[in-house]
Amino acid sequence: MLGTLVNVAAVLAGGGIGLLLKKGLPKKLSETLMKALGLCTLYIGISGCLAGENTLVLILSMVLGTLIGEGLDLDDKINRFGKFLESKFQKSKNGETKKVSLAEGFVTASLLFCVGAMAIVGSLQSGLLGQHETLFAKSMLDFTAAIIFASWLGAGVLLSSGFVLVYQGSITLLAQFLKPFLTDPVIAEMNCAGNVIIIGLALNMLGITKLKVMNFVPAILLPILLCPLLS
């Protein structure tokens, strides 16, 4: 779990620095930076989804995963959780109540930090081999991203550290059990589906769409079942 714990610490540290910077950023500059981050996120998603080799697995994963996500209404539950936390973190300014935005930051940062090959492969290496180098490298990237995202999206970015702990920690602890199923093709298709979701997230950040991205997340796990059936 060392690699995951370092990753969690990096997100918390970066998010804390970002919150300090948030106070000094003009609104216009913050909005421009957010658009720039949206473009970078779009690039990450497009370049990452090219890892997939079986289009049918991707299509079925997205369709079935979305049906599961919509049925469970994951996006609504996550946002309601964020809004519940917002009600606990209200700030008062000049006699007026100002809510600290958490839901958007939590969802956006959780997806960016947890969806991708480094999170999966790094957690497997950590659990199976005791090698944490991949997660250490990911921690540096997440530290930088957390600074930028927290400066715009607020304290919700810090809460995403809990999602990182649960997601990567679960893979690490279950590595011995999952190893027979996570072949290279399966990891590639999981990475592909995850990065397609990242593209949707980027479109939201750019203000082009308002997709309920969390409802797509179950698609990431479905290649574990679909790849053996369609190979």
Image (cartoon, rainbow, N blue to C red):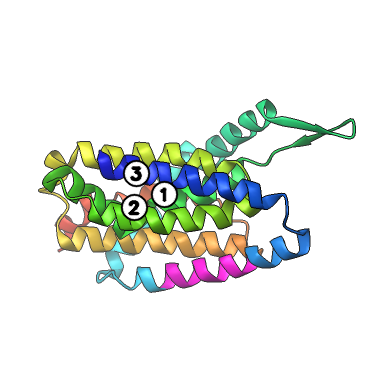
Left or right, 25 with reference to 120: right
What crowding class fits label 1: few (fewer than 14 Cα within 10 Å), some (14-19), or many (20 or more)? many
Which is more N-terminal, label 3 or label 2? 3
Q: Amino acid at mark 3?
A: Val
Left or right, 176 with reference to 72: left
Q: Nearer the viewer, mark 2 or mark 3?
A: 3
Do the residues under discs 2 and 1 have CB atoms within 8 angstroms?
A: yes
- The overriding secondary structure of the stretch rendered in magenta is helix
Q: Amino acid at mark 1?
A: Val
Q: Amino acid at mark 2?
A: Ile
Q: What residue lies at 30% left-to-right and 53% top-to-bottom? A: 136
What crowding class fits label 2: few (fewer than 14 Cα within 10 Å), some (14-19), or many (20 or more)? many
Span colored in magenta: 35-46
Q: Find the distance from the CA under tag 3 to the CA under tag 1.
A: 24 Å
State the mark number for residue 220: 2
- Whether residue 214 can be seen here: no
* 30 w.r.t. 10: above or below: below
